[in-house]
Image (spheres, rainbow, N blue to C red):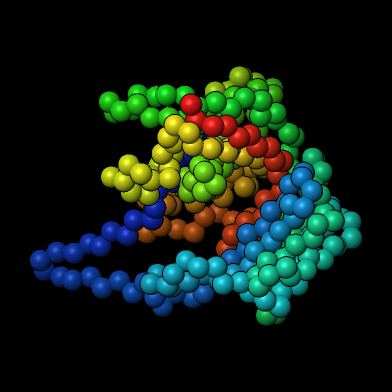
Amino acid sequence: MHNRIYISLSLVIILLGSCEQVIDVDLNDVEKKYVIEAVLSDQANSCKVLISQSKNFDEDNNFIGITGAQVTIADGNGPEQTLTASAPGVYENSGITGVVGHTYRLKVTVSGQVFTASSTIPSKVLFDTLYISDELIFDEVIKLSTLEYQDPPGRGNNYRFIQYINGEKDKTIFIRDDDLNDGKRIDAKLFARNDDDDDDESGSKIKKGDLVKVEMLCVDEPINKYWYSLDQSALGTNESASPANPVTNIKGGALGYFSAHTYQAQIITAP
């Protein structure tokens, strides 16, 4: 498996050509699919589902929500609870709070199509320490968010970390498992990747006085696989000829994911 913090790069499109032949790649005539991004944590007011559609390559990345969907979440085999639209494409239910160890079922019905998924909230591993460390990388001293936690005995723990710098979300994908560090004290450094390596002012670089927030999510294995495959596709390190869609836990043909997880966060000012 993978035992490191994975770094997501911006998607790179490589155009191949030669002096003998020009290859025209049609990036626009791709069948659109629904995209579902659903989350539920052990915190109140965390139940949210975003529904949109995939876009052609030349379209912008602005979120355009899909209205008129029917969205429900059920705790195990219990009754379904309905999520209502709070904005176009945004469905919420403040009365649903996840419970550790419970498996939740998501159902989305839109334009006659039905999509389902399930996700289990794993045990909560305490996020007890966050600090900023100075690291020498390629003859340059940079500041990195560093967090510590005690991985419990027994393999199968999966973690996702989300970093914000001065309120701006870092686009880097940070995930980790315990395949090689089961039961150990973990010291995890978040090696962020800038969108533009030549831009020293990028929000991905921590500077003195920056307000840094790190969220720690304990996720189940299917969600770990989703983020891992998304990261690998963006990096272009898979063996396919072109980037592939990440491995989703949603059934029915939609893209995206349903993540039921624990949530913790800490905030620090960079020294």
Q: In which quarter of the image is residue 123?
A: top right
Residue positioned 35% across, 26% down in the render: 141
207 sits to left or right of 51: left
Extreme residue in the top direction: 184
Residue positioned 39% across, 24% down in the render: 135
46 sits to left or right of 226: right
Extreme residue in the front direction: 209
Q: Give the percent coordinates (x, y) of residue 166.
A: 52, 43
Residue 184 to residue 214: above or below: above
Q: In which quarter of the image is residue 17?
A: bottom left
Q: Give the percent coordinates (x, y) of residue 195.
A: 37, 49
Residue positioned 56% across, 50% down in the render: 226
Q: In which quarter of the image is residue 157?
A: top right
151 sits to left or right of 141: right
Residue positioned 28% across, 59% down in the render: 14
Q: Can residue 115 be seen in this view?
A: no
Extreme residue in the left direction: 19
Residue 179 to residue 231: above or below: above
Q: Is residue 266 visible?
A: yes
Nearest the eye: 196 or 42: 196
Nearest the eye: 7 or 22: 7
Extreme residue in the bottom direction: 111
Q: Give the percent coordinates (x, y) of residue 9.
A: 40, 48
25 sits to left or right of 207: left
Q: Give the percent coordinates (x, y) of residue 1.
A: 52, 35
Number of numbered labels in the structure image? 0
